[in-house]
Image: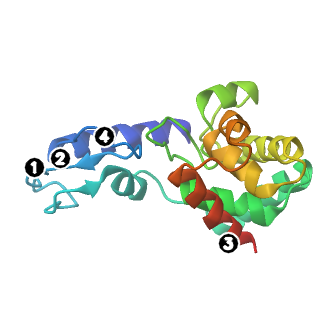
Amino acid sequence: MQAALEKQRASVRKQVSDWISIGEPQPNESFILPWPKPATPASSIALRTPGIALRAMLDSVPCDPVPEPQLETIVNDAAARQKVSPKLVRAIVEQESGGRPCAVSTAGAQGLMQLMPEVQKELSVDDPFDPKASVEAGARLLRTLIDRYAGDVPKALAAYNAGPGAVDRARGIPPIPETTNYVSKIVKKIE
């Protein structure tokens, strides 16, 4: 599966570079496509509007989401082992990757649970694109953060998104728009 994903990613990168020009990274960590080149006849997507977010486009291209029954089993098993809510783990997967195992953020986070490479090392994740490995490690990280913040799930979510250092410095959810939106969206999903 890993070889197929890498081949697919390389193909997407080539297609994207053939028909768009990429602008500078924006402060919110997204990339903007300021003036797309005309689509080639081989392109399946014709971009005609400037200012389309690259991340949204790429998130829709690289791979399909994990099939629902498989994702449910993976989430439920990992949540049970780590003694965290499966609903919470599922909400993180949906928010982080939309259930796509090949998701890669502009910051470099990878897989269903969008783990950064240094976190992957700490949690002994060999393949961040393996759905089971990603969800297991993400659930383990979540358990650690929930324990660190004495069961305060919003603080744990903020730490998952912005890092424990940011939460500790702010003595709560840091006033980072991405983080406050992230926490708010997930809390709404689990209520």
Q: Position of residue 12 (x, y in %)?
A: 32, 45
Q: Do residues under tags 2 and 1 come within 8 Å of each other at their CB atoms?
A: yes
Q: CA distance from mark 4 to mark 3?
A: 35 Å
Q: Which residue: 43% across, 40% down?
A: 106
Among numbered discs 2 and 1, the one appearing first in the sequence? 2
Closest to the camera, between mark 2 and mark 4, is 2
What is the distance, in whole Å, between disc 4 and disc 1 at their CAs?
15 Å
Marked residue nearer the N-terminal end (2 or 3): 2
- Give the SS element for disc 3: helix
Q: State how far apart marks 2 and 1 are (Cα).
A: 5 Å
User: Which residue does the image show at 74% across and 64% down from the upper left?
Assistant: 72
Q: Helix, strand, or loop for circle 4?
A: helix
Q: Residue at x 75, y 51 (%)?
A: 155
Q: CA distance from mark 2 to mark 3?
A: 36 Å
| Residue of label 1 | 37
Cα separation between marks 2 and 4: 11 Å
* Residue type, mark 3 in image: Lys
**Real-space CA distance between mark 1 and mark 3, rounded to the nearest whole angstrom:** 39 Å
Q: Which mark is residue 20?
A: 2
| Eye-nearest disc, 1 or 3 | 3
- Category of crowding for the residue at label 4, using alpha-carbon neighbours closer than 10 angstroms: few (below 14), some (14–19), many (at least 20): few
Q: Is residue 38 visible?
A: yes
The residue wearing badge 3 is 188
